[in-house]
Amino acid sequence: MRVRLLHSDGTQLIIYSTMHDVAARLEVGVLQFEFASAGTSTGIPFELPAAFGTTLRALKMAIADSWGSAESGVVLSAVGGESLVVCAGAAPYMLAVRWPGSPPEFFYPEYEYDSYAQREF
């Protein structure tokens, strides 16, 4: 699964998850990012609300356990407090996505949301 964040100038940020082996029979999802020009059609398009057209605060989400840590998500917060969350999903190679007004069935992260440490990039 890939998500495309569309910018008003036509550029796009593509986000997807890859799996990393961290222990015997244990994988963790890690986010990957690609920039693309207008016209790219890979992934699910997501046009950000107008509130996200100004200054954003970006936080990375990291999960830590006995096997180490992995950066598995991102939180983009608009000035007004609305947030877009994209993180590795509960199923391999899937994403959990939450945005203002989104239905809860789109957000099933790999780990409990409160388990992730959020810190500046």
Image: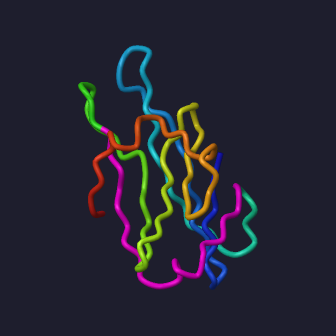
Residue 55 position within the rendered picture, expressed as x and y whole percent measured from the top left:
41, 82
Which residues are the magenta region? Answer: 43-63
Q: How is the image coloured?
A: rainbow
6 shown above or below 28: below
Based on the picture, tell me whether residue 50 belongs to the magenta stretch: yes
Q: Residue at x 42, y 56 (%)?
A: 74
Residue 66 position within the rendered picture, expressed as x and y whole percent measured from the top left:
24, 25
Residue 67 position within the rendered picture, expressed as x and y whole percent measured from the top left:
27, 26
Which one is nearer the viewer's eye here, 2 or 55? 55
Residue 90 position within the rendered picture, expressed as x and y whole percent measured from the top left:
53, 33
Q: Is residue 67 left or right of residue 53?
A: left
107 shown above or below 55: above
**Residue 15, quarter of picture:** bottom right
Label count reads 0
Q: Split into 4 quadrants, where in the image is the C terminus?
A: bottom left
Q: Is residue 38 left or right of residue 67?
A: right
Q: Residue at x 36, y 26 (%)?
A: 22
Q: Split into 4 quadrants, where in the image is the N terminus?
A: top right
Q: Residue at x 75, y 72 (%)?
A: 39
**Residue 57, quarter of picture:** bottom left
Which one is nearer the viewer's eye here, 90 or 33? 90
Which one is nearer the viewer's eye here, 6 or 97? 97
Q: Is residue 58 left or right of residue 51?
A: left
Based on the picture, tell me whether residue 76 belongs to the magenta stretch: no
